[in-house]
Amino acid sequence: MGLLLATPLSRARRVLRTLTGDPRSPLAGRTVMVTGASSGIGEATARACAARGATVLLVARRAEALDRVRAEIEAAGGAAYCFPVDLTDGDAVDRLVRRVDAEFGPVDHLVNNAGRSIRRSLELTYDRFHDVERTIAINYLAPVRLTLGLLPAMRAQGFGHVVNVVTWGVQVKSPKFAAYIASKAALDVFGRIAGRETYRDGVAFTNLRFGLVRTEMIAPTEAYRRLRALTPEQAAETVVKALEDRPVTVDLLSAQVIGLANVVAPRLTDLVFSLADRAFPDSAAARSGSGSPAGSPRSATTGGR
Ligand SMILES: NC(=O)c1ccc[n+]([C@@H]2O[C@H](COP(=O)([O-])OP(=O)(O)OC[C@H]3O[C@@H](n4cnc5c(N)ncnc54)[C@H](OP(=O)(O)O)[C@@H]3O)[C@@H](O)[C@H]2O)c1
């Protein structure tokens, strides 16, 4: 049986906790590694996990930002540790895994959240193959390497959970996001298959397919300024629920409907999306090509959209 009833039972326990006013979370006492914890969804997730009694391992490149998050978590009575790492550096990821294993033992939950988004039409991408390389590097290769590093200890202890923060785009398939969504779709598929292999060891995978969240990542896209978006804190609550319940996927009803339409009437949805593609042109940042080649510093993360 193993994980078969884990999610419904967790949900039932949450209802019970709410009814009895029990504030304890299943995350209390667990070790949670959050990548991309220096800003946005990752930062808010780290705080939310620490507030529920988890020991949080914070990973991202900006050491000062991580230190600020750690200090704020500690000031609020929580426990957090910083690991400033460029996750696109494979050797650095391997060192991170060895260090965490030696100092903390098995990580119970891994939130693969670090990522970068690029919204740019194919027309503007012909001479920008690095857009494809850098999205794959951080959105797919990095989380897969980290997951492979942490999995043996999770499987050995008979408990583990990997949450992949992906996007509703894997179902919707929005124009101008080919490089970004393809890299997230690769992670989505990896997680789904990995979860089947680790099922009997009690290690679950969750693909969390967010819609828009108001973070630095979407700031350069003018078209998003008027659209509804979650706050990072609201997004973090969704991550926490996923961590507590360990479902296979978390996705939006609208994305499920569009995903179904993409299967049932693919040419019709192509027509609708091609009209939307024309109605929402490339942002000024994407047109100016302010992104830099693979491995470039953070200033290019959002500028490349
Ligand atoms: N915002 C949205 O609408 C939305 C929607 C769907 C999915 N998502 C996904 O949600 C995740 C978080 O994004 P966000 O919106 O919170 O944006 P964000 O504030 O820009 O966060 C991105 C995080 O990734 C880290 N990161 C980037 N490259 C890294 C690298 N090479 N090594 C280590 N860390 C790296 C960044 O930290 P450093 O710069 O310090 O390294 C930062 O903490 C991403 O995977 C994104 O694709 C976002």
Image (cartoon, helix red, strand yellow):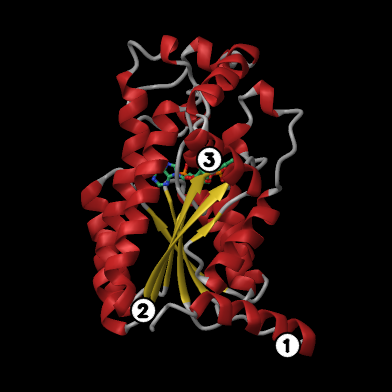
Q: Which amino acid is tagged 2?
A: Gly
Q: Earlier in the sequence, mark 3 or mark 1?
A: 1
Nearer to me, 1 or 162: 1
Marks 3,1: beta carbons within 8 A: no
**Mark 1 Cβ inside 8 Å of ligand 1:** no
Please tell me which residue is depicted at 30% across the width and 61% down the height of the picture.
194
Q: Residues within 10 Å of mark 3 (few under 14, many from 20)?
A: some
Observer-side mark, 2 or 1, equals 2
To which residue does mark 3 refer?
A: 259
As drawn, the label of residue 202 is 2
Would you say 94 lies left or right of 15 here?
A: left
Cα–Cα span, label 3 and label 1: 38 Å
Nearer to me, 253 or 301: 253
At which x and y percent is residue 139? 38, 42
At which x and y percent is residue 216? 60, 37
Q: Is residue 152 above or below residue 165?
A: below
At which x and y percent is residue 287? 52, 11
Please tell me which residue is depicted at 51% across the width and 25% down the height of the picture.
119
Cα–Cα span, label 2 and label 3: 30 Å
Q: Quadrant of residue 47?
A: bottom right
Q: Quadrant of residue 51?
A: bottom right
At which x and y percent is residue 85? 36, 51
Q: Which amino acid is tagged 1?
A: Asp
Q: Quadrant of residue 133?
A: top left
To which residue does mark 1 refer?
A: 22
